[in-house]
Image (cartoon, rainbow, N blue to C red):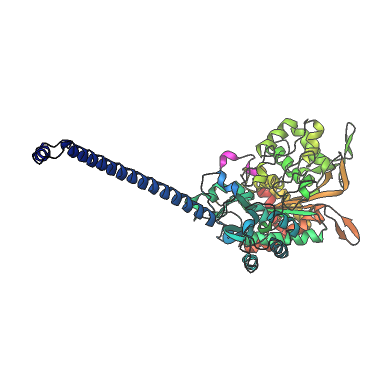
Amino acid sequence: MIRRPLRPLARILSARAQGKDPDLIEAEERAARLAARHRAERQKAETRLLLLGLVFVLGFTTVAGRMALLSAAVPVEPRAALSSDPIRAQRAEIVDRNGALLATNIVTASLYAQPATMIDPKRAATELAAIFPDLDAGTLEARFTDGRKFLWIKRSISPEQRQRVHDLGEPGLLFGPREARLYPNGAVAAHVLGGASYGREGVHAAEVVGTAGVERVFDARLRDPERSEEPLRLSIDIEVQAALEEVLAAGMAEMNAKGAMGILMEADTGQIRALASLPDFDPNLRPPLPSRGDPAESPLFNRAAQGRYELGSTFKPLTVALALDTGLVAPSTLIDTKGPMRWGRFTIRDFHNYGPQLTVEEVIVKSSNIGAARIAILQGAKAQQDFLKRIGMFEPVSVELTEAARTTPLLPARWSDLTTMTISYGHGIAVTPLHLASAYAMIANGGRRVTPSIVLKDVAPDESRRVISERSAAQVRAMLRQVVLRGTARQADVPGYEVAGKTGTADKPLPQGGYARDKVISTFASFFPATHPEFVLVIALDEPVNVINGTRVRTAGWTAAPVAAKAIRRIAPIMGLRPGADPEHLAPVLYTLAGNE
């Protein structure tokens, strides 16, 4: 930069030549330089002020824009903001073995409030209480006026309810999108499906999670986005399920029972075609868990998979199966049944006096407690324990139901000789009906243990799971057929379907110890057709009372057995089983084929 001189030589010489004062020229130059410097500094200051103003304008514009967005946006319910993971609402459908829909999803809405934007909180509270009877107008009004900015009112509402709320015209009442679980068959298969509810929730979405049954067991699979279009296929048949529940409900009413349960299982595979427990519930309106009292009194209680009962004489075929398989007895072996049988200070009695001796076959047909106890003593406590353990009576049933996985059989603390005898006829050990169905499947399929399953899959017979020989299983099957033809289960006979099975009537234990004399669990465990068993059916009634000619009877032969017969008549044709020839004179042939002597 070239600076201007304060005393320019040309102007100085010219001024001297004209007789002027050269100092004036220096003063002018000094003033001009000062003015130029002032202009430069002013321009720099103005530029700085302009830039600073622009910065402030941009900052305030950003803040104002953000505040405008926040004031216009719908508030997010705080619990949903705790996780940064997105809420996935989509849930896969559930279908039966034939593809019939059991559980699906529907689009609905949630209802929430922004009290700060309400026009008339008192009127809104009153009108909402009229639309939703479970809401209290006073409580709502108090919450609308206590200063809160957000309030959930209903997690899920119907389209009709949404329209009625919309018609109120209250700007502080708002709706959020929801996907809800729908069970189109209502209460049918309720204990299998279980139910679902909301997990994490936000205004714009809610997570649907399983609460019980297969919905809970397969919760992760049903919520997997990659498999949302792939339905979960169960092994149950919804038509068979509905028929079984209908028969159970009618039988429960006819027999004046407080509860009923039924299981239909494939003998070879353990696949469950139907599983019912009454009373039941509608999973669309699943009731809350009981906070007090006996859980078994709740309709949520799954008697088939969760209830542990002493199942009485249905255990006798298991006792005989072990004795036959170990060679201790044959079907024609005579057993001392003279009674009453005394063991220390305890006495074992039969329902009737069957005489001093019965064959092993007659012990089953007539259902002799003394005979079963004598056979159990022959085999011993250790052999009985090992056998029951091998057929799964010591552990929960590994079926895909949460309730079953948590239910361990109740076993005696000390396995004495007396315990061995009482367990031989189903007292002193408490198991679920699912345990019993699995054990009878083992007899029906020729001696192989099966794993019950509620999910449809290919299952091949596994010889490595053999528990007893085919010969022993066939001998027991022949005996159980005779129980229906001429024994305690004659009410269960269904011509053409060769029903075989065993009744069991067990007194219910009292909470304070001992047994009730007027309350029983009556059970009929069966399979059909007897010559080539395909299906196992277990029916049990809780505290039944059947009145016949003015006489009150509770035994399974007059309560559970006739209900089972009605069930077989209904469900066998649905499954495509056609009735065949079933004359009684073929029974001796069946015994010979089974190895009876």
Q: Is residue 591 above or below residue 328?
A: below
Confirm whether the magenta stretch covers residue 466: yes
State the image coordinates of residue 9 (x, y, percent, origin top left): 11, 36
Which image quadrant: the C terminus? top right
Q: Nearer the viewer, residue 2 or 442?
A: 2
Q: Quadrant of residue 94?
A: bottom right
Viewed as shown, does residue 101 lie left or right of 505?
Answer: left
Q: Nearer the viewer, residue 112 or 189?
A: 112
Q: Nearer the viewer, residue 286 or 525?
A: 286
What are the residue bounds of the magenta stretch? 461-471
Viewed as shown, does residue 73 lie left or right of 364?
Answer: left
Q: Quadrant of residue 186?
A: bottom right
Can you see residue 326?
Answer: no
Viewed as shown, does residue 59 lie left or right of 389?
Answer: left
- Please identify the residue farthest to the bottom as the structure is shown: 167
Can you see residue 253?
Answer: yes
Residue at 77% across, 43% down:
360
- Please identify the residue farthest to the front as the structure is shown: 19
State the image coordinates of residue 331 (x, y, percent, origin top left): 73, 43
State the image coordinates of residue 518 (x, y, percent, origin top left): 88, 49
Q: Is residue 240 above or below residue 298?
A: below
State the image coordinates of residue 371 (x, y, percent, origin top left): 81, 41
Q: How many marks?
A: 0
Which image quadrant: the N terminus? top left
Q: Nearer the viewer, residue 517 or 481?
A: 517
Viewed as shown, does residue 86 lie left or right of 158?
Answer: left
